[in-house]
Image (spheres, coloured by chain):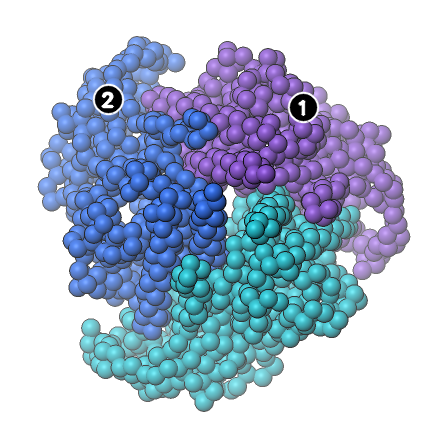
Chain colours: A purple, B blue, C cyan
Amino acid sequence: MTKQWFAAVGLAFLLAGASPAGAGGPPVSEATQGCLECHTSVTPGIVAAWRASAHAKTTPAQARKKTALARRVSSKKIPPSLAGTVVGCAECHTQNPQAHADSFAHDAYTVHVVPSPRDCATCHAEEAAQYQHNLMSQAYGNLMANPLYRSLVAEVLGPRRLAGGALQRLRADAATRADACLSCHGTVIKVTGHIKRQTDMGEMSFPVLAGWPNQGVGRINPDGSKGSCASCHARHRFSIATARRPYTCGQCHKGPDVPAFKVWAASKHGNLFTSASQGFNLTAVPWQVGRDFTAPSCAACHVSLVTNSDGDVLAKRSHAMSDRIDTRIFGAPYAHPHPQSADTSRLKAPDGLPLAASLDGKPAARGLISRAEQAKRRQNMQAVCLGCHATAVVEGQFARLDHTVRTTNQVVALATQIMQEAWRSGRARGPAQGGSAFDEYIEKVWTQLWLFYANSTRLASAMMGADYGAFEGGRWQMTMSLEHLRHLARKAGRQKSRP
Amino acid sequence: MTKQWFAAVGLAFLLAGASPAGAGGPPVSEATQGCLECHTSVTPGIVAAWRASAHAKTTPAQARKKTALARRVSSKKIPPSLAGTVVGCAECHTQNPQAHADSFAHDAYTVHVVPSPRDCATCHAEEAAQYQHNLMSQAYGNLMANPLYRSLVAEVLGPRRLAGGALQRLRADAATRADACLSCHGTVIKVTGHIKRQTDMGEMSFPVLAGWPNQGVGRINPDGSKGSCASCHARHRFSIATARRPYTCGQCHKGPDVPAFKVWAASKHGNLFTSASQGFNLTAVPWQVGRDFTAPSCAACHVSLVTNSDGDVLAKRSHAMSDRIDTRIFGAPYAHPHPQSADTSRLKAPDGLPLAASLDGKPAARGLISRAEQAKRRQNMQAVCLGCHATAVVEGQFARLDHTVRTTNQVVALATQIMQEAWRSGRARGPAQGGSAFDEYIEKVWTQLWLFYANSTRLASAMMGADYGAFEGGRWQMTMSLEHLRHLARKAGRQKSRP
Amino acid sequence: MTKQWFAAVGLAFLLAGASPAGAGGPPVSEATQGCLECHTSVTPGIVAAWRASAHAKTTPAQARKKTALARRVSSKKIPPSLAGTVVGCAECHTQNPQAHADSFAHDAYTVHVVPSPRDCATCHAEEAAQYQHNLMSQAYGNLMANPLYRSLVAEVLGPRRLAGGALQRLRADAATRADACLSCHGTVIKVTGHIKRQTDMGEMSFPVLAGWPNQGVGRINPDGSKGSCASCHARHRFSIATARRPYTCGQCHKGPDVPAFKVWAASKHGNLFTSASQGFNLTAVPWQVGRDFTAPSCAACHVSLVTNSDGDVLAKRSHAMSDRIDTRIFGAPYAHPHPQSADTSRLKAPDGLPLAASLDGKPAARGLISRAEQAKRRQNMQAVCLGCHATAVVEGQFARLDHTVRTTNQVVALATQIMQEAWRSGRARGPAQGGSAFDEYIEKVWTQLWLFYANSTRLASAMMGADYGAFEGGRWQMTMSLEHLRHLARKAGRQKSRP
């Protein structure tokens, strides 16, 4: 293909009418038309996805005119330069050029590779602001700025070598981190240079990005902002239906450390959603229980604006997942009242660890939400439950979860007591002995108990996941790990006591 | 919302015509209209599900008029008071009020919280009767009234404490049982008192139920009946399509102890059903091979009324899953001829255990179906297979399963021999030594061998589950567990023999 | 049913018009009409699947007339006897009768039970030829003719007995192999005799087949050919949509040894395909990015003929999966350049093992593709990626995969060093000591490290599978296995050193 050919296609496009929806549709900016001239051929999948999007079919000005509950553009003022055309390539990729370290000259424009929540905030200000109160937006720092978790990352990912018969851990590298933990937590995207490439349009220069590609929820963007709206609203269609489907959450919430998707899929909710969702209206805003859907996905309970058949709001839209969650039940040894700040690396437990509770279970004195706030958040969640369930069902369900939080915390405390005794007695080398908490076989057995099995058991309790609280990474594995831990600790003890 | 408001809505509803299907549809009883007046607003999800149901669109009298094969109301006599209106809220929730310990005065009616199979039997007598011959209807007692399995439950769920350096198990509580094993097996639902709640209609009194919510297949209901039709025919739509989809069975048959859903999903059957089921007719009664579906879900092979293109019945509808199953291949150490009674807690093996076979594999003298009955049930199943497969395929398939039953039983016998030797020699403490069979690490390794891996291998063989008989919880893990068991038993032996 | 009845039905069928698509549709051969007379009743599921197929709706002559890109019949010359009628029962089941050891006299015809790729090649010559260059076509021999892997099979499947306190392995039998490894790799199908059966048509004789049923990708057919087109294009609909859906690949690529399906399902690709595929056109040939699909299944990236919106071919159709794969990342201890030949049993590593690399990682001197060929294959794959992604995304993605290949190979080398030291020191008995590499607990821990966890980590890297490279059978389990291995080797060493 030649540049002449592209020009011809571009001309044909212009003559055919500039709206992606055909003649009579909303107008496309001249800049976006320029992008489409080539990219319709160069990256047809991207352009096709965008053409199917709401962005390609509506202008911000039109979107602002919807009634309050139906409105999806929350910013009160849209810059006039953007209000009258559809949201196309240029509208996102050329915004705030100075702020973007990844901006580069491309054809006649200064574009950037990585649109960020700050760009999206131009039209979706409320959502972007809410998201900054979401733990997920801080997922990079919550992992990497917390010394304990950073050590966990290192022990999982770091290469090893044999040194004097022992396994010695070497430093993990950025590529491996990006491929594993940070694929969900988010990488730091940095411009490391520029590269010239031969294209159909001749030689062009592009920035070289470290940490790219990545769609992690706590990504550190070249403009300094955190997160990626495309994590859930996959580019370039940015469909609300995609974010409402459970497969989106399942990308990161599926493994043994947080099997939320699998737990949901095994529940009655998951059964009914999977069976019936092809008949659901997954794009309706607001989302009306009974009319638009009859079984919830993750979004229905945790995030979406949900109304009842009278049009009453059961739950407000939120992009801070924790607005309806009173207790944090995974990601740490102990379940605990939700942190006040999305930045959990600032937590400090009585034993000095950067956690919401000491290893013996004693809670941090500061940084966790109050009982009153817990009650309020629980009420937010239960309002959704009550759209389909009687009060007795809802209360019974939450009483069971509260009980599970207590009993799993007890098992974690007992396991940790065994682990700490092994550290104290020298059977293993823990943080207090200058070692890592995660680099010996026995330590990984302990870690799995809380990171996998206690978490899974709590998630199963929260979402009626049946075997995920029993044999599928649940209480069976939790109890077996406890016995395994005891077995390993005792054996080490016996070996140690021999002369 | 106020009471006045509800009354206004109710009036509007009455004026608009009392049929949920609109004017001209079948009539709704006055009592159900009363329920709907408030609950359309209070629990819109429930009402929407019901409005979409066959219950809301047909009266029992109309349903009785269908031809024999198409009929879904099996009771020969429907009480006149119920025959002429659709099956609404009141029809189910006010039946047999004296029998229901959970009955309470609510508005002008005596309603109960938990409709039971006995209530459903008013219209669906045959299905309810069949279900009582289903092992699942006895799932509570089959677990909790069997001393060996009750001990397994206790060891999985019971909290622990450290006492003198050893792990001491404490009693498991009802809430934990309800959250784990009994979420599928069914809880005992009991009225423990009453509570007053402030509602939109003013203060109202409601029963407080222990063991609630629960949808376990062997639930003990407040009217003394067993099971829950809603386990599979999810309330309040009670759709036959839901029960025919595999996700329903997958709620409980997905974990490593019984990965039937996963095995099916990995099979050609699962592949084709998942790929093509949006084009299937999942509500047709009878269910015609080729026309209504071209790949089977669980229901097609195990339960549903299936006909061929000539209208011949290939398999009769049954709610006793075992009508087409000759050999029980999971849930016990050894595969064995199916029990005669749904109540398996009455089985007695030669070694006195409440099982179909002794720990060494010797079968119980009584209580298992005869070879002739096995042959008959196999024929029932194969009639479905032959709807799509040639005889050679079906015979080859079953020969392979029979072989797998024999070889997995041999591995279980060998593993159990190692375990019993460990018990006898004092390396572990088993039932004969006054201990539990399930509370030590080595015992859990043994348990996993039969409860997870032998079962999975058999299920994979029965349903062509490929890797579930090899690397995915199959023969690899079965063999590795055997070697692990040997490793642990030998090591313990060596340690013991030291002075 | 009687023979008379079948004759009547047959007559009715003939009178009604011989086309499966009704009067005016393409003609059905007389022979196939004869089959349908009975089999419409006897195996309605098969006939219904066929009636829905392209085979039943088109004649080869019509199919040949399509434009080059749309054509699905690649053979340049179709035998005149087959060209003019639809492809029915007889067309496949009576082809090449002399070549088929499974041919038998049935009604008036000589039919065979197992149509083979050689039969399909009559119309689909190119695809059949491509497939013979696919590793999968050699899957039987690649497992069973490789002494090391044959030993793995034996150790996974072979029964055991206790002999003098040790576990002694007995020979695995064909039925168990067919039920496990060979269910995917393919069995050897042999005629072992004939059997007479009573049918609705009177007594008939049928061949008895060993290794049947089976749909393994490397099946050895009764005509000596290898593979089964029905593995992916499930009989008897042979739908291209089925092969393009991921569930087909998932039948064999789902377990811990090769969790490709699960990795894909957890990726953004899997999320979007699962969410949106009901709106995709999965039967379009060629398959146009953006128009027909907006998220890839396995087939889109690895096999299918994919075009862009200009009609340019992004990737040619291939039935050799490796045409777009430069590096083999699973199925062996080390990732390595793809083998030249589909028959990998002929590989020879420097240490004499039938592998692409010695146990210490040193690559075989011959038999692997060159760097230039690797570059070409990578370009084939990237052409598909670039249909939806910018160059920087694609390059970043592949750089990460290359890095993961290196680092996982390093971990495997370290683990193997520990294992080999254990073998040398007598702590375990390996091949050099006349033992198996796979029959001791410690050896299985080593095997899992490379066969499960290193493979899973690489697949996660290749397809953006997030937790499959971290906690879900990824780096966590890989590292933990390394520490477990060290733990077991050290302990054995200590025990050995005691007098």
Is C423 left, or right, of C176 in this rendering? right
- Residue C183 image position (x, y, % from top left): 46, 66
Answer with left or right where residue B100 lies relative to residue C216: left
Residue bearing the label numbered 2: B191
Tally of numbered tags: 2
Residue at 40% of width from left, 73% of height from top? C212
- Under tag 1, what secondary structure? helix
Calculate the distance from the C-alpha at mark 1 to the C-alpha at mark 2.
46 Å
Q: Quadrant of residue C372?
A: bottom right
Q: Position of residue A108 (x, y in %)?
A: 87, 42
The residue mark sitting in front, 1 or 2, is: 1
Indicate the position of residue A285 as horizontal and vertical percent values. Answer: 53, 30
Query: Which residue is label 1 attached to?
Result: A345
Residue B164, picture quadrant: top left
Of helix, strand and loop, which one carries label 2? Answer: strand
- The answer to whether residue B165 shows anywhere in this view is yes
The amino acid sitting under disc 2 is Val
Name the one closer to the observer, B460 or B282.
B460
* For residue A179, above or below residue A92: below
Residue under mark 1: which chain is it in? Answer: A
Residue A72 occupies quadrant: top right
